[in-house]
Amino acid sequence: MIDKPAGLLSVPGIHIEDSVYSRLKTRWLNREPLIIHRLDMATSGLLVVARTKEAHRHIQRQFLKRTVVKRYTALLAGEPPGAGGEIHLPLRGDFDDRPRQLVCFEHGKKAVTRWELISTQNGLSKVHFYPLTGRTHQLRMHAAHQLGLNAPIVGDDLYGTAADRLYLHAAYLEFTHPVTRERLRFESEEAFNDISAAGTS
């Protein structure tokens, strides 16, 4: 389990070598890090990396079967409509403006997010997101779109307004150990506990 900082790639990019993968490969020497899932470069938080192919296959199946429990914490620029609920907005890539995504009821892939409001202060809202599917930019789109929460994540330079960082953090992961079958739970506290300080650090 890795706690990834915002601004670090999960795997190397075309022009950027520094990543969770490259750092672990240096640290693990002769062992290949097997990245099971990815976080956007701008997203901080928990990332699962396997040491063996068997563990990789087992945990990846859990992600595919959606038996992994994931919770993200985010700060929104605005106040969502209500105290919680589910967002059902299908998504597809914007072919004319990659990497942006679009809500598309005709050709989009199913995307579902459960959410709950934690607190509001000075026009900002802290929420928990529980993605029930794993589409590209799902949480960012479901937060920003007018048919979603109509309140973009603070620092979202694609669907909102840029800030010192994207205020989205992968805070909780729960899955089954591939060998012992024990149910494992990991939690990482977000670095933006003080809503009033958002965008100023």
Image: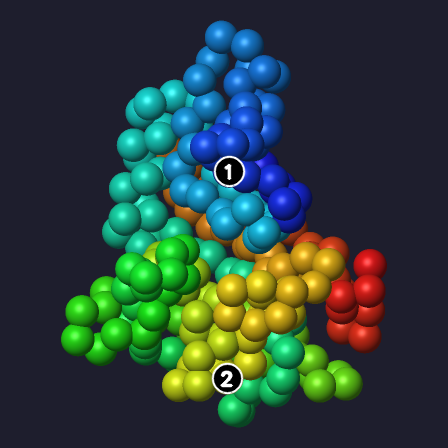
Q: Is residue 87 above or below residue 91?
A: below
Q: Is residue 84 visible?
A: no
**Residue most toward the left?**
106
Question: Residue 83: which quarter of the image?
Answer: bottom right
Label 1 sits on a secondary structure element that is: loop
Q: Earlier in the sequence, mark 2 or mark 1?
A: 1
Label 2 sits on a secondary structure element that is: loop
Q: Residues within 10 Å of mark 1 (few under 14, many from 20)?
A: many
Q: Is residue 105 above or below residue 156?
A: below
Q: Position of residue 97 (x, y in %)?
A: 38, 61
User: What residue is shown at x 22% (from left), y 77% (from top)?
Assistant: 105
Question: Residue 2: which quarter of the image?
Answer: top right
Q: Amino acid at mark 2?
A: Asn
Q: Position of residue 152 (x, y in %)?
A: 55, 75
Mark 2–mark 1 contact, CB under 8 Å? Answer: no
Q: What residue is shown with label 2?
A: 150
The disc label shown at residue 88, or none: none
Q: Position of residue 191 (x, y in %)?
A: 74, 56
Q: Amino acid at mark 1?
A: Ser
Q: Left or right of 188: which side holds 28?
A: left
**Residue most toward the front?**
96
User: What residue is shown at x 62% (from left), y 70% (from top)?
Assistant: 161
**C-alpha gap between disc 2 and disc 1:** 28 Å
User: What residue is shown at x 82% (from left), y 64% (from top)?
Assistant: 200
The disc label shown at residue 10, or none: 1
Q: Residues within 10 Å of mark 2 (few under 14, many from 20)?
A: some
User: What residue is shown at x 31% (from left), y 35% (from top)?
Assistant: 58
